Amino acid sequence: MDGSPDPVQPSEAAVSPYFERSRWKLVAAAAITSPVIVAVTWPHADHSRMLWFLAIHQIAVMAMAMTFALPDRRSPHPRTLPPLATIGLVLSQLLLSSALFFDPTAARSADFAFGVGLVLFAFAAGTVAVLGPMKLVARIALVCMMVPYTISGLAFGHPGIAIGTIFFLVTIAGLAVDKTGALFDELYTLRDEASQRAEAAEAIATTDALTGLTNRYGLTLNDGELLQKEVSGIFIDLDKFKEVNDTLGHKAGDDVLVEVARRLRRYVRPSDTVARLGGDEFFILLWSDHEIPVMDIANRIREAVERPIPVEGGVAEVSASIGLSRQSPGMLNLDALIQNADEALYMAKSLGRNQVFASSVRLNLNATSTAGIAADSRPGDSERSNGQFD
């Protein structure tokens, strides 16, 4: 044991798409190779026998194509084909390699045998490239393709061709298949690493480093989404947050933001978007249908934020002023949704903070009124929330 890490093995998720893209190349190559053999050997062969060979081989190619086209092509083993596809491949290769047996008289000609061999060698190299990481299947195909040709070479007096074929088979089936598989593994690893780096970079660009919520840039990526249902926006601004920073320090302020972010997540579904716009401002996009009215959700959020938050050096107490807005189905106008919610938030603050205020303007409905529905959110008075927002 040299202690070196095992090479990365592509999963079925990686190998299967590769085969999806490559399988028809193999079928096309098998279909074309048989007529090529007939054309190369036509001057030396019995035409009727070669035509029989061509017909039988094309039937085998069609069977292989049908097995490759079955709806469920997955194999329980990542580097193998489904059994039917393997059978179709083996049958096609065996027929292709048996060309010499169709005309024993012509097969005794070295030119005839060598012409068939050239076509087979080219097809073998293409098989290795097309089958890619499926080493076992590639070797099975190569053996089925070259062994009958080797036997016929010995049977019809071409020991040199037979020995050369064996050497070619060992080299291709051994070294070339391993090299192709290793190259695929390396490319897959590089692609996987690049994908992970891209995902990490995107996460960094769209995630607030302190709270783990979506940041302002990440929120803007939703702009222009096609809405099938109404979407609601909840704009949250923390009251008395500056006092926390001034009295308990910025570390305590950061702890408050982290805890508020955690509490916000509890009152929305995973399909909704919770974002920190910056400072002590948060925004929630309610994409999904909720069993309770948005106004009630906002009041529950307000009550959750109002609970004392233990921080380093004491206990922080903040509250939340909340503005609500909504948009009907259509193209999401995020700027307008945020602006309406911000204006409602301003009204909530002007009413004494720790309030929920809902804008009556519903985007995309030609609404012109800027009046709103206020909910006095003092403890015990939440029943005054007006559910007409929903």
Image (spheres, rainbow, N blue to C red):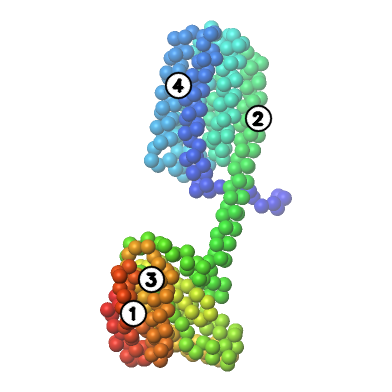
- The disc placed on residue 241 is none
Snapshot quadrant of residue 199: bottom right
| Element marked by disc 3 | strand
Indicate the amino acid at tag 3.
Answer: Leu
Circle 3 sits on which residue? 286
Q: Earlier in the sequence, mark 2 or mark 3?
A: 2
Foreground: disc 2 or disc 4:
4
Image position of 365 (left or right of 133): left
Circle 1 sits on which residue? 370
Residue 299 shows up from this direction: no
Indicate the amino acid at tag 1.
Answer: Thr
User: What residue is rendered at 27% in x and 79% in y?
Assistant: 388
Q: Are marks 4 and 1 in contact (CB under 8 Å)?
A: no
Q: Earlier in the sequence, mark 1 or mark 3?
A: 3
Circle 4 sits on which residue? 57
Name the quarter where the C terminus is drawn.
bottom left
Image position of 182 (left or right of 71): right
Foreground: disc 2 or disc 3:
3
